Amino acid sequence: MSRAILLAPFWVWLLTLVAAPVLILVLMAFATPAEGVPPFTLGLRFAAFAMLVEDFYYAEALLAALRLAATTAGLCLLIAYPMALGMAGLRPGWRLPLLALLMLPFWTGFLLRIGAWIGLLRDEGLVNHLLRGFGITDAPLALLYTEGAMLAGMVHAYLPFAVLPIFTALIRLDPALLEAAADLGARPARVFFSITLPLTLPAAAAGFLLVFIPAAGEFVIPELLGPPEAQVIGRVLWQEFFQNRDWPLAAALALVLLALLILPIRWFQRLGASA
Amino acid sequence: MKPGGFVRAMMLAGFLFLWLPILLLMGFAFSADRIPFQWGGFSLRWFGVLAANERLLEAAWLSLCIAAASATLAVLAGGGIAVALARFGPFRGRAIFGALAGAPLVLPEVVIGLSLLLLFVALEGLIGWPAGRGALTILLAHAGFGAAYVAVVVQARLAEAENSLEEAAMDLGATPLVAFRTITLPLIAPALVAGWLLAFTLSLDDVVIASFVSGPAGTTLPIALFSMLRLGLTPEVNALGALVVLVLGSMLALALWLLGRRQG
């Protein structure tokens, strides 16, 4: 009985700040946009969803977002695995400082790091300055507002999230297994491919998903570093909401994004439960 | 297992990739040139320009206040949620409770921002509170997702320690409240501090959710920075970056030194 009273405020908290918003989001997706404040009238219409199906612009935005998320997560994994391997192989005394070095960029502010990439890549930026200084190019290369700039910013922002689970799995690996394999005559490469890699594969998958899930809804990096045509779902949702003031369409886009992410999220939760 | 040369080189390259843009941003903060990332001789003029930018300073102060208040609220809510999940045993709706507690960790930012804005609009229509959007709605939104992160950190700490200490205390006659205060609370105190810092940083760094739930009166530092970066980069941003990294870096170095001293 007293337990129910203790739980009550937390139920109110979770139902108000998590459950209710998502339910209202569903209601909104079936409403109709209207002139006025707030700009909608409630109802049960499928107009927003019909628009998502009819206009290929939205399907392309979804595909572009999934492609960006998968490319980012794949690149992060390629860089993160050897990084984690190197970190785990050092003396334990090095681990804490290296972890700090890995996580500190995360604490320095996401927008400031994007600012750094703008400063490096724009026409009057450092990279173009150096290229001209060494006589490699005459005119500035268009580096900013390209796919490459967007990917660099994405990988830079999300890389630490891919390193952490792999690093944790590597230092938890039983050294006896590796020693046994080496004693039985396996070369280092063989030990890596038949023991280290298979045992840390779930952690690598977790690292991939830890990047993929937030990257799929990313808005800020495509907006500030990417080309205008990189219309990912996060950007389209933002424009429908802030510029077109079409709240039902924005809500429908949010629901579609959620539906696409359910499988990766379930997979991530299963990996977390087994670890 | 000794890392080979290739692995070492990749690790160094990875850290260089992470740090080089940040170090360059900091270094060029001390350049006199009005074009960012161009060296025009050593100068502190951009720190002066930054200090005179009242709009940015006001936004920074608002951000710090929102971050501190929302992190405190997040610790209270998230800490309670974690204790309920780890120590209350089975209760009705526990699975839903747990799913709701973890949902903000996996929902995309644009979805959280939009859905919370719709909640605030609906609440204003139904009960008249919160009236309008601004600092208060940003604070509540940040507390909502900050609590999810605090709950994870505290739950991990509670999972490490078995329930047996609390049970022993209660077997010896302690009331649940006394057992909580003398055992559970000291046990989770470090996790509460870590969770507060995490929620504080997340709040200070958020531009997407804040943009959705803020009105004209709620310009936080990230919202101001975002609109500056949309127009391009100014040397003031370099100066701001240098300040943030220096302050955070020295705080982290201090924390590491304290940790190392306690262990040694």
Image (cartoon, rainbow, N blue to C red):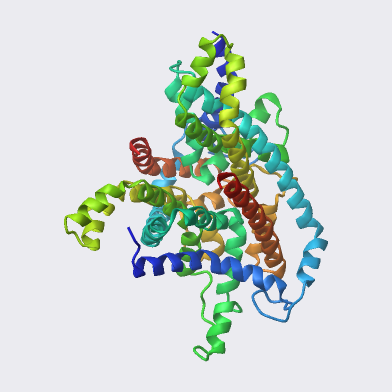
Q: Decide: is B96 above or below A243.
A: above
Q: Residue at x 68, y 30 (%)?
A: B124
* Relative to B197, A23 lies left or right: left
- Camera sees residue A151: yes
**Front-most of residues B180 and B75:** B180
**Front-most of residues B258 and A245:** B258
Q: Residue at x 57, y 47 (%)?
A: A241
Q: Decide: is B228 above or below B152.
A: below
Q: Residue at x 65, y 32 (%)?
A: B73
Q: Position of residue A86 (x, y in %)?
A: 39, 61
* Relative to B181, A47 lies left or right: left
Q: Position of residue B1 (x, y in %)?
A: 32, 57
Q: Position of residue A141 (x, y in %)?
A: 51, 81
* Relative to A176, B245 lies left or right: right
**Front-most of residues B191 and A225:** B191
Image quarter in which the N terminus of chain A is found = top right
- Camera sees residue A40: no
Residue located farthest toward the left when viewing the structure as drawn: A184
**Front-most of residues B222 and B77:** B77
Residue A262 appears in which quarter of the rendering? top left
Q: Residue at x 40, y 48 (%)?
A: A168
Residue located farthest toward the front when viewing the structure as drawn: B264
Image quarter in which the C terminus of chain A is found = top left
Q: Position of residue A205 (x, y in %)?
A: 34, 49
Residue A15 appears in which quarter of the rendering? top right
